[in-house]
Image: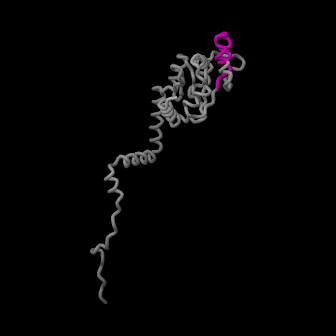
Amino acid sequence: MKVKRVKGAKKILNFYKHSFGIFEPYQVLVDLTFCHAALIGKVLIKEQLPKYLDADVQLVTTKCVIEEGKSLGPQLNGAVTIAKRFQVRLCGHKKNSVPAVECIKTMIGTNNPKRYFVATQDRELTQHLAAIPGIPVLYLNNNCIVLDKATTVTSSVAQEVRVSLVTINPSLHEKETLKMLKTDLPETERKIRRKRKQPGGPNPLSVKKKKRK
């Protein structure tokens, strides 16, 4: 696996970590479109995804995802077999299964409370997720796993969070700004600032002469 790809993923992961509190082990919600593409491309999800993210990963799916795969016929048997190897999370559709896309939308909700990643090849689902801030999306391209860059909505919300933190705690922001400014000073100027003034003798004007008795 190319180092450049891993570094690129790490940069995106750091963004989600600091902006949305998404930490390891990463919970990756996988649908059948991703499993099917992985099967065709001979991508071993359990082995390659942790290497790509350079992190601990929990692969999960739902009952609805598996049931939909079963209903679509033998052409998806391989994808269903892969999905069954993942942890099956409760989705709230125990009695009556719903389409996989709808199930995943329910799992994510409006603010992704469980901090899921979503691994999918489904365009409709990807477009839906793009409108919700803070959802890392994984997909396969040329048999390579790719962590998508943050969407415009996600980036905007992250910026708003940063601004609000500065407003709430300006002293911290000032400290960071001062630190950056000091770092940007030329070396000669930093040396001058570090020099201490040598203690001199007493000010002759402030020394009073002793009165004669």
Horizontal and vertical percent position of residue 13: 52, 33
Tell me: 53 left or right of 152: right
Q: Residue at x 38, y 47 (%)?
A: 183
Horizontal and vertical percent position of residue 32: 61, 18
Horizontal and vertical percent position of residue 20: 53, 34
Q: Is residue 105 above or below residue 166?
A: above
Q: Quadrant of residue 194?
A: bottom left
Tell me: 170 left or right of 117: left
Q: Is residue 184 above or below residue 96?
A: below
In the rendered structure, which segment of residues is drawn in magenta?
Answer: 60-80
**Along the viewing direction, whichever of 199 and 52 lies nearer the viewer:** 52
Q: How many marks?
A: 0
Question: Seen from this angle, which residue lies furthest right?
Answer: 95
Tell me: 202 left or right of 95: left
Tell me: 155 left or right of 99: left
Does 79 appear in magenta?
yes
**Residue 157 visible in image:** no
Does 176 appear in magenta?
no
Question: Seen from this angle, which residue lies furthest bottom?
Answer: 213
Q: Is residue 4 above or below residue 143?
A: below
Q: Residue at x 63, y 15 (%)?
A: 99
Q: Main secondary structure of the magenta part?
A: helix
Quarter of the figure with the C terminus: bottom left
Q: Quadrant of residue 112?
A: top right
**Residue 148 visible in image:** yes
**Along the viewing direction, whichever of 102 and 69 lies nearer the viewer:** 69
